[in-house]
Amino acid sequence: MNLTIIRHTSVKVSAGTCYGRSDVELSGTYDSERRIIIENMNGISYDFIYTSPLSRCYKLAADISGDHEVTCDSRLSELDFGDWENCLWEDIYKTQNAVKWFENWTDTPCPNGESFSQMVSRVKDFILEKFSEHKNDDLLIVTHSGVIRIILFLLQNLNIDEIFKIQPDFGEIIQISFNPDNLSLV
């Protein structure tokens, strides 16, 4: 099985803005970024395409899909930052909720959002389900940096403290080949 993961292209969001689950606009460079991704995908084959339902992922998945059906799966969405969506991080840092969250970001949910552990659980559920369904198929996933970090964390058995060492760029293509019969997720 081969797994290809692509992070969505750049977005039209002010620097320092928290926009996890928000459906934000793509930047004006989308067309050129998309062309580069398509060029870099030359020779990469896939049988199924899965994407986050957010437009920044779905549009790219649809544009590169060719004759493949694109399947949206909400488990591939970015972290739900709840009340912090579309706020500046510098303002978020000043809140009491942020102090609590940063003390235990893995298990503390964002106000009216989700925790990192909840996100890991849904991404892990997706991976286990799809790898079981598609043991001999090649998959393409278009998603967000947080989801990519979690997939790599799970597949490589990384320590949670290492997860932010994974810094996927906008439009980055990551390829993984493995035998799902021997798959072990933490």
Image (cartoon, rainbow, N blue to C red):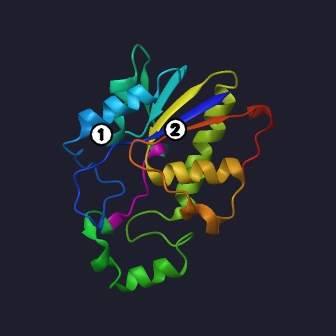
Residue placed most toward the observer, 162 or 51: 162
Establish if 129 lies above or below 133.
below
Q: Is residue 81 magenta?
A: yes
- Residue 101 in the image, given as x and y percentages of width and height: 47, 77
Q: Which residues are magenta?
A: 76-83
Residue at image coords 30%, 39%: 55
Q: Which residue is mark 2?
A: 5
- Residue 73 in the image, given as x and y percentages of width and height: 46, 37
Q: Nearer the viewer's eye, disc 2 or disc 1?
A: 2
Establish if 159 lies above or below 140.
below
Establish if 127 lies above or below 139.
below
Q: Which residue is mark 1?
A: 55
Q: Is residue 164 left or right of residue 134?
A: left
Residue at image coords 30%, 63%: 85
Kind of element beneath mark 1: helix
Kind of element beneath mark 2: strand
Dot 1: few (<14), some (14–19), or many (≥20) neighbours within 10 Å?
Answer: some
Residue type, label 2: Ile
Q: Looking at the figure, which quarter contains the C terminus?
A: bottom right
- Residue 169 in the image, given as x and y percentages of width and height: 43, 50
Furthest residue in direction left, as rendered = 28
Residue at image coords 38%, 47%: 170
Q: Are marks 2 and 1 in contact (CB under 8 Å)?
A: no
